Each structure stands twice: as structure tokens, then as C-alpha cells.
């Protein structure tokens, strides 16, 4: 009899045959065996081992945008590991996921947020509130768009765009926040269409005074490194806020949440 922690933090009990190598047991309904080698600790410096006062930078970057614009795909690419769930279904990300990346002397703490949409249920409102709470707490806001979808809708600014701009403006009034505009999925459209769609969005969101704008492909990784470099150079100076001495070096999330991101796509599909 084996007792293990479920994804919701509770304990579930079941029996299974142990094969070669240790395995992880996830949930009671969805049994996923994952080799422990995937979670082998890597050697990283702790925050206290870094060279303080040497021009290091550190800060939180909230990745926000409508549902299915590619926020989770982008964060996985930025941190170099799959720590956020990615599926074609909308509202797949239901809680904030934290990922950590290091660029030269900068520690970037990414906050992958649920998609912003018009909530109808209490649970929907909780997801949207989680996204805006992350934006309010972050040092920078990375506002992401799905360019092909915007083009398909005749490049019309809808009420949700209005709300997003209004909420970001309200956040900036309380405390200065740098904003970066990210135009995603440019690989799925012509260069001319991508430029025209980007111009409409950048003009509408000029009121939030974005420090830069990037046209990327989160799936292929086009211009993602340039985006990462810009984020690292824009974040405020400071020592690393998160120790990197934990088994999952790219995320301080509880292991159950990270396992959930690995196993849920198998169930959803």
C-alpha cells in the first residue's frame, strides 16, 4: 500500500507494482508514472551565494493577455522547461504559475496568469482576479496578443481591449509599471498583415506608455531571446529574491502543481 500526495494537497492511497527506478504517483483518478530522473536536482547558486552589489537585477514580470494568446508557451520557452500547462483549450491555466529564468546578472521571476475574459461565474471571476492581482504585484507587465486572431476579427478593438487598457492604467497610477507589448504567432501570418495588426494594437495601447514592443513566435522561439534580454535590462536593480536551491530549479511551485501541468494535458486531450 502506497500513500502519496494528490494534486490538491490531500493524501490518496493506492497499490501499484514498483518497477525499475523510483516513480511519482499523481492523483487518484489519473495515474501518471514519471521517472524521478526528470526531477533530479541541478546545481544552482543560492541567493546568498551570489555576488551582492555587483549590478545584479531582479524582479517579477506578469505575463497577461486574453485566453489562448500563448502566455504559457512563452513562459515555458523563457525558463527552458515545461512548468506551465499548454493545450488548445481556453482557460486551461487556472492559477498563477511562477517560473524563474536567469539572464546574465538578472533573475527574472515570471508570473504566468489565467487568460483575461468576460467572467460569468464566481470561479471565472476568481481566475480573472488572479491575473490582475499578479499584474498589480509585478515590477513589469508583459501584455501579450494573438495577432492572427486579432486579424481574423477585422482588427477591431473590442470592450475587453478597453478594459485591459483601463486596468493597466489604474495599476500604473498607484505605482509606476513598465509595460512591454508582445505580438505573438507572427509565424502564422504574412509580414504585412502582422505589421498592420501590430500598428493598430500599439496605437491603441500607447496610453500605457510601453517601453518596447516585440513580434515573436512563442512556439518556434522567434525573437524570444531578444525579449528576454530586454526584460533583463529593464528590471530594477536588486539581489535575487528566490533561492535557486530546490529540486525543480525553474519553478518554486509545489511539486504537485508542476506535476499537474505535466499530467493535465494528457487528460484534457
Image: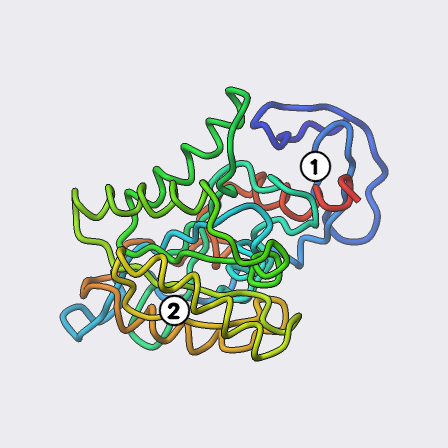
Q: Position of residue 108 (x, y in %)?
A: 35, 62
User: Seen from this angle, which residue lies furthest left?
Assistant: 53
Circle 2 packing at 10 Å, graded few (<14), some (14-19), many (20+), is: some
Quadrant the C terminus occupies? top right
Residue at 56% across, 57% down: 150
Residue 53: quadrant of the picture: bottom left
Could you give the CA–CA distance between mark 2 and mark 1, rounded to whole angstroms? 30 Å
Q: Is residue 72 left or right of residue 251?
A: right
Examine the rendered structure and indicate whether residue 29 appears above or below residue 61. above
Q: Is residue 227 left or right of residue 5?
A: left
Which tag is nearer the camera, tag 2 or tag 1? 2
Q: Nearer the viewer, residue 243 or 143?
A: 143
In this view of the protein, can residue 222 be seen by the observer?
A: yes
Quadrant the N terminus occupies? top right
Q: Position of residue 191 (x, y in %)?
A: 58, 79
Which of the two labelled residues, at mark 2 and mark 1, occupies the earlier sequence position?
A: 1
Q: Nearer the viewer, residue 146 or 115?
A: 146
Q: Nearer the viewer, residue 16 or 59?
A: 59
Q: On the image, numbered disc 1 is attached to which residue? A: 26
Circle 1 packing at 10 Å, graded few (<14), some (14-19), many (20+), is: many
Residue at 49% across, 65% down: 183
In this view of the protein, can residue 243 be seen by the observer?
A: no
Assign a secondary structure to mark 1.
Answer: loop
Q: On the image, numbered disc 2 is attached to which residue? A: 102
Q: Is residue 139 left or right of residue 152?
A: left
Q: Position of residue 146 (x, y in %)?
A: 56, 58
Amino acid at each position: 500500500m502506497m500513500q502519496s500526495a494528490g494534486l490538491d494537497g490531500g493524501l490518496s492511497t493506492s497499490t501499484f507494482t514498483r518497477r525499475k527506478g523510483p516513480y511519482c504517483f499523481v492523483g487518484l483518478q489519473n495515474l501518471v508514472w514519471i521517472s524521478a530522473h526528470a526531477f533530479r536536482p541541478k546545481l544552482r547558486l543560492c541567493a546568498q551565494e551570489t555576488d551582492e552589489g555587483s549590478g545584479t537585477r531582479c524582479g517579477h514580470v506578469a505575463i497577461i493577455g486574453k485566453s489562448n494568446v500563448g502566455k504559457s508557451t512563452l513562459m515555458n520557452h523563457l525558463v527552458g522547461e515545461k512548468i506551465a500547462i499548454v493545450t488548445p483549450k481556453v482557460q486551461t491555466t487556472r492559477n498563477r504559475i511562477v517560473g524563474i529564468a536567469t539572464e546574465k546578472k538578472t533573475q527574472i521571476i515570471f508570473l504566468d496568469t489565467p487568460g483575461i475574459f468576460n467572467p460569468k461565474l464566481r470561479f471565472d471571476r476568481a481566475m480573472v482576479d488572479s491575473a490582475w492581482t499578479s499584474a498589480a504585484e509585478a515590477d513589469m507587465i508583459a501584455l501579450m496578443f494573438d495577432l492572427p486572431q486579432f486579424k481574423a476579427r477585422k482588427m477591431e478593438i473590442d470592450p475587453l481591449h478597453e478594459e485591459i487598457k483601463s486596468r493597466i492604467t489604474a495599476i500604473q497610477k498607484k505605482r509606476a509599471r513598465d509595460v512591454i507589448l508582445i505580438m505573438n504567432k507572427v509565424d502564422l501570418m504574412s509580414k504585412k498583415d502582422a505589421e498592420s495588426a501590430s500598428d493598430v494594437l500599439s496605437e491603441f495601447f500607447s496610453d500605457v506608455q510601453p517601453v518596447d514592443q516585440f513580434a515573436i513566435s512563442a512556439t518556434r522561439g522567434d525573437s524570444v531571446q531578444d525579449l528576454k534580454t530586454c526584460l533583463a535590462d529593464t528590471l530594477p536593480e536588486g539581489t535575487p529574491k528566490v533561492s535557486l536551491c530546490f529540486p525543480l530549479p525553474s519553478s518554486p511551485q509545489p511539486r504537485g502543481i508542476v506535476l499537474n501541468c505535466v499530467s493535465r494535458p494528457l487528460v484534457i486531450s
